[in-house]
């Protein structure tokens, strides 16, 4: 039986994304670059280096996206390039990002712009990083600068990317800079990132009055939240259930609630919690940026507390591939009462074995959520290009386009999944033509 066509609302945003440090190359003035020089911290021993050379090749990359029918693109501004020392803005970097925005415009791609995507200028890292309250002030000043400078080219602003992942990887698991292992300090960092979001939200609305796309709205401000489903590995095991409950509470629900209610309430058993009321955080959200990849099965009392569901298909990083989870994540995100933008979703799959059918299944799951009444505004696949996957180095290949990191030129190769996604973007939906491109292959929902 032919599969039914599924179309999306007019004006739906279709695109892909990347972040500055993961794609640009040569970002030497941030804490990640310094961290990458420490032996053993990056899988495969290879740091970001020249990354994808996107700093140089951005115009070609946007041409690829536009030719594939994309109408939006997510990127981040590299704070360490724009403000290499406190209060000193680099004219060359400013001019570069203006060139990036004008290229996006020429290619018909609406920019979705992230202001903090994990990396920090060295001077921030060396003055207490995100454990220091002063960093919130510094970030707000940076955001004001960006709003004034780039507001005429940007309407969709994403303040912080995955505050919870940033904090837990860097301050609890200790596998990202600054490599701390202390849950109490991780909670302080999440709280500061949330406060920074609230302050950035107000600053962007105060400073950006220029309507870049002519739709009557000058600034739409959201954040990107990594929403992972947390389930007990052994449903009968009280400790697995308890741990899954607490992790879901701190990782998902507390972060979400804070931007609705303006109340930060973060706790982990055995750690110093954070409770704070912040008026600038209350209602500080125009849209919810949803990053969705997988679910974690929680195993208590284990050195490896998060595992994939036994028997489930997995990506190259071992993460369960569960497209149906995107529908559930969108439903959960919609509880905040704001439009949802899928800011990241993808599969680490170097061979492109799973990704083509997975894209179809993810998009169908998103369609199902819209059918249940959620206002979803767009979908940004992660990622346009294979890129530097943080501590996993060049191991996790998420790109619609493969990048050859062994060649100094960094040539791009179009994967079959780029074609599948192009058909979806051009049709604004999943049609018979899309199913033909995956040859009827399906991944379990
Ligand atoms: O590559 C990352 C991105 O920087 C943040 N969200 C998850 C992606 C895949 O791990």
Image: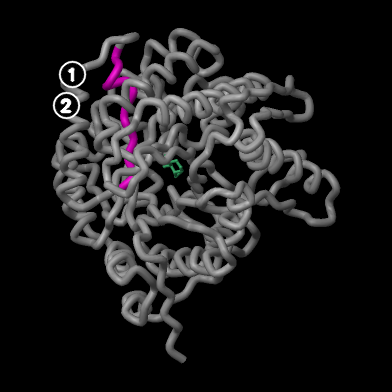
Foreground pick, 407 / 18: 18
Where in the image, quadrant-wise, is ligand 1 located? top left
- Residue 82 is one of the magenta-drawn residues: yes
How far from the left and from the top, in percent, is residue 49? 26, 30
The residue that disc 2 covers is 95
Give the left or right position of residue 215, taking residue 118 as reference.
left
The residue positioned farthest toward the bottom in the image shown: 1
Q: On the image, which quarter does residue 24 sit in? A: top left
The relative height of residue 433 versus residue 23 in the rendered view (above or below) is below
Cα–Cα span, label 1 and label 2: 6 Å
Residue 120 in sight: yes
Q: The magenta stretch spans which residues?
A: 73-84
- For residue 91, which numbered disc appears in the image? 1
- Residue 159 is one of the magenta-drawn residues: no
How far from the left and from the top, in percent, is residue 23? 28, 38
Q: Determine the secondary structure under disc 1.
A: helix
* Residue under the image location 39 percent in, 73 percent down: 430
Give the left or right position of residue 25, taking residue 430 as reference.
left
């Amino acid at each position: 039986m032919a599969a039914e066509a599924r179309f999306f609302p007019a004006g739906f945003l279709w695109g892909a994304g990347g972040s500055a440090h993961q794609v640009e190359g040569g970002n030497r003035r941030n804490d990640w670059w310094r961290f990458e020089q420490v032996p053993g911290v990056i899988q495969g021993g290879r740091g970001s280096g020249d990354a994808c050379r996107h700093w140089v090749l951005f115009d070609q990359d946007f041409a690829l996206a536009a030719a594939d029918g994309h109408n939006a693109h997510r990127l981040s501004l590299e704070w360490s390039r724009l403000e290499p020392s406190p209060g000193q803005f680099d004219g060359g970097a400013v001019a570069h990002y203006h060139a990036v925005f004008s290229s996006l415009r020429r290619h018909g791609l609406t920019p979705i712009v992230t202001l903090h995507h994990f990396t920090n200028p060295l001077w921030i890292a060396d003055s207490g990083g995100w454990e220091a309250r002063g960093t919130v002030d510094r970030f707000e000043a940076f955001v004001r600068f960006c709003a004034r400078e780039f507001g005429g080219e940007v309407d969709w602003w994403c303040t912080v990317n995955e505050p919870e992942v940033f904090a837990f990887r860097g301050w609890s698991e200790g596998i990202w800079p600054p490599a701390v292992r202390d849950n109490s300090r991780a909670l302080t960092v999440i709280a500061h990132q949330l406060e920074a979001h609230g302050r950035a939200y107000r600053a962007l609305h105060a400073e950006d009055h220029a309507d870049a796309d002519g739709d009557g709205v000058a600034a739409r401000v959201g954040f990107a939240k990594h929403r992972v489903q947390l389930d007990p590995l052994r449903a009968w095991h009280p400790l697995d259930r308890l741990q899954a409950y607490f992790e879901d509470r701190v990782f998902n629900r507390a972060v979400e609630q804070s931007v609705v209610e303006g109340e930060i309430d973060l706790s982990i058993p055995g750690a110093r919690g954070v409770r704070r009321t912040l008026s600038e955080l209350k209602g500080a959200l125009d849209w919810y940026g949803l990053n969705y990849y997988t679910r974690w099965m929680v195993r208590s009392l284990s050195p490896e507390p998060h595992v994939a569901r036994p028997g489930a298909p997995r990506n190259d990083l071992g993460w369960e591939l569960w497209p149906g989870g995107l529908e559930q994540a969108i439903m959960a995100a919609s509880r905040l009462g704001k439009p949802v933008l899928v800011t990241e979703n993808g599969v680490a799959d170097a061979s492109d074995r799973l990704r083509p059918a997975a894209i179809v299944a993810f998009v169908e799951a998103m369609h199902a959520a819209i059918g249940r009444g959620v206002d979803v505004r767009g979908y940004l696949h992660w990622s346009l290009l294979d890129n530097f996957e943080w501590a996993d180095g060049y191991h996790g290949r998420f790109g619609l386009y493969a990048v050859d990191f062994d060649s100094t030129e960094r040539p791009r190769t179009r994967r079959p999944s780029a074609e599948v996604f192009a058909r979806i973007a051009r049709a604004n939906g999943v049609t018979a033509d899309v199913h033909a491109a995956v040859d009827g292959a399906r991944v379990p929902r």
